[in-house]
């Protein structure tokens, strides 16, 4: 069975099964930490690029004003 060409431009190191699993776990944790640290900025960036962001937003309500 032929493996497809790797999309990585880096040389693929030889890893044991355990090392590959540990590296994957580390990368997941790194990505999660990055997303948590930069959530607000990432959210603003992607929201500003969304076609839905061009729609007018409903006016914000005043919490001190009686809604009725």
Image: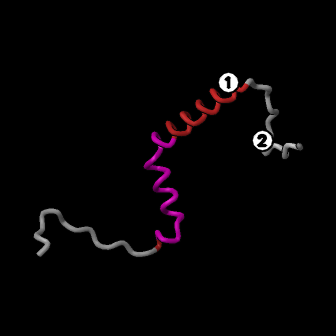
Q: Is residue 9 left or right of residue 48?
A: right
Q: Is residue 47 above or below residue 36?
A: below
Dominant SS of magenta comes to helix
The residue wearing badge 2 is: 8
Where disc 1 sits, the SS reads helix
Q: How is the image coloured?
A: secondary structure
Q: Is residue 63 left or right of residue 54?
A: left
Start-end of magenta stretch? 35-53
Q: Are marks 2 and 1 in contact (CB under 8 Å)?
A: no
Q: Residue at x 43, y 49 (%)?
A: 40
**Percent of width and height locating residue 22:** 63, 26
Q: Residue at x 26, y 68 (%)?
A: 60
**Percent of width and height locating residue 28:** 57, 36
Q: Residue at x 78, y 41 (%)?
A: 8
Q: Residues within 10 Å of mark 1 (few under 14, many from 20)?
A: few
From the image, state whether disc 2 or disc 1 is nearer to you: 1
Image disc number at residue 18: 1
**Percent of width and height locating residue 16:** 74, 23
Q: Is residue 44 above or below residue 54?
A: above
Q: Residue at x 82, y 33 (%)?
A: 11
């Amino acid at each position: 069975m032929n493996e497809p060409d790797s999309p990585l431009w880096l040389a693929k190191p030889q890893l044991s099964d355990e090392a590959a699993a540990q590296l994957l776990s580390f990368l997941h944790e790194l990505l999660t930490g990055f997303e948590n640290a930069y959530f607000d900025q990432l959210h603003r960036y992607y929201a500003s690029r969304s076609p839905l962001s061009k729609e007018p937003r409903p006016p914000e309500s005043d919490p001190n004003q009686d809604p009725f």
